Image: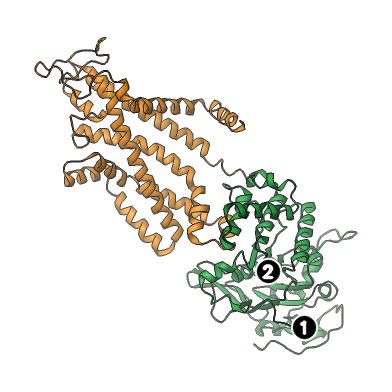
Amino acid sequence: MRNRATVATFFRSRPGMTLAAASLVVIIATAIAAPLLAPYDPVAQPDIVGGNITAPSAAHPLGTDQFSRDVLSRLLFGARVSLLVGIFATVVTVTVGTAYGLAAGYSGGIVDEVMMRLVDAFMSIPRVLLVLALVALWGQMSTTGLILLLGLTGWFQLSRLVRAEVLGARQTDYVASARALGAHDFRIAFRHVLPNVLPPIIVFATIGLGNVIVLEAGLSYLGFGIQPPAPSWGNMIRDGSELMTAAWWVSLFPGLAIVTTVMAVNALGESLRRSLGRSESRA
Amino acid sequence: MSAPLLTVKDLRTYFYPGGGKVARSVDGVSFHINEGETVGIVGESGCGKSVTALSIMRLIRAPGRVEAGSKIEFDGKDLVTLDDDSMRRIRGNRIAMIFQEPMSALNPVFSVGDQIAEVARIHAGASRRDAWKKAVEMLALTGIPAPDQRAKQYPHQLSGGMRQRVLIAMALVMNPALIIADEPTTALDVTIQAQILELLRDVQQKFGTAVLLITHDLGVIAEMTKRVIVMYGGEVVEETSTPDLFTSAHHPYSEGLLHAMPRVGDKRERLNVIPGTVPPPTAWPSGCRFRDRCKYSWERTEHEHPPLYEIGPGHVSRCHLADEPERRKDPHKPLVARRSIDAS
């Protein structure tokens, strides 16, 4: 009862965060419910011979593309792919980055030094170049491959962030106190240090999710990401890119979907950053 | 008499901050604590009190280290050479430490009950439920009202005095043989200080726990201890019974500390201070380490490092005045023996 009241006050005092979170919930819900909501099969090409592009109408609210596929249905199914890749890649990023940063920061000394110089080396290559190079190396990319690729190229900065936070937390009295009580290193790292460095990790994860969605869209746009005919927001824009003047609806709607999602994610990240900031030092 | 509970012998803890410098923060400290005894260590900031405590707990981290040749005997084991796992089983179990800052020594993201329970889980392998019951029981023992409610609260919901009680509860979970309390009351209000000291004394009497009490507050020393060690410049400069320190301190540094204490009804307008500050541990002066600040210093104190002279039964002082008492300008007591008990 008391908790429910607290949650309500929390959201009421943060209208921006509430709006962003609510939009995301709606977007994710529609993605999950895509098979129920989509009026047509996203890959069906009913008029394969004529290749009829039709403008938005009652039958096709967002029109059809050059293969006569329903844009709305593709948009809904594309959301599944884009969000799935984005979320799982972020999970990979957060897991690897946190573990790496925690290990480096907690070990300290030469281990820390070596681990961080390695990260510096990775960071000296722009992420897009790194991703493209790996795609070229890999050839055809499965969805799992894409998730791993995006996840494993995004954790460098997070690991530095986590390491810095861990270095700070390691110096705190409660860590000294835990050690004085006979806790072993593993326990101290996971029970005492990790929970106290979570806020910046959460913020990074949210903002990172936005980046990954854009990156995946970019890759698919270039033809390296999700392969047609499976819809993703990125390859939908690509489908419409040559028809921009004749059939604006083919590219516009997936573009809007990306912009809305990424803006909601970033707004959420930003307000999380503000409310998680340093306010946990209530002491 | 049985062997002391803790014997520290020639403890040297040096720090190597780089640039070829060596900070000799604790430099040849020896003392012992008997079972159930409360011993105080007093001295200014930077004299090596806390480093001594951390060395006993073996919580000194790089760039610091306890030098070879130091001996810390506890329960018949040498804590300096003990393996890490065994040492971990002693911490929080046989020797517990109470930190100075009750504000920051508790983890902000866990309830205090959880944190007390953790000790029982680590050392007694208690189940979640038993550990929680133990935590509530310990909170009750430290005189916190409604302990089962308080246990669920987080550190920021408790006052400073309450948090210090929680830390004491954590220290007592395993009924340790020795509690090291590093300035346990410094961060608290005066009224709370008195309560916390009383609590410490209560539990000490109830469980027969030995206490090593580190403080710069002579009032706390007077109230809590039977025996006191005065530290200066990383060394023990005087050790005696507590009443003795207040009536017949020998070392000029101890004298200075006593005189710096304000007294009720005192007509002085300014407090007495010991001139100067503790020199940095990277550059202790030659001879007597206190000589720059001492009103008696003479030529001998410049080259000859004073040994611990025996002043009386159980009373030693690291001052050449024991050898040349006539140099004390206003001797406040007859000086007795001058036999050195310090071999070095």
Residue B38 falls left or right of residue A65: right
Q: Chain of mark 2?
A: B
Residue A36: image tag: none
Q: Chain of mark 1?
A: B
Residue A35 falls left or right of residue B235: left
- Residue A161: x and y in percent read 42, 48
Q: Which residue is mark 2?
A: B178
Q: Which chain is depicted orange?
A: A
The answer to whether residue B280 is seen in the rendering is no
Look at label 2 and name its amino acid. Answer: Leu
Residue B321: image tag: 1
The answer to whether residue B18 is seen in the rendering is yes
Decide which of B260, B315 is in the foreground and name it. B315
Residue A227 falls left or right of residue A96: left
Q: Residue at position x 33%, y 44% from top?
A: A154
Determine whether B174 is above or below A89 in the image. Answer: below
Q: Which chain is depicted green?
A: B
Q: Element type at marker 2?
A: strand
Instruction: Choose mark 2 or mark 1, whichever is in front.
Output: 2
Decide which of B83, A221 is in the foreground and name it. B83
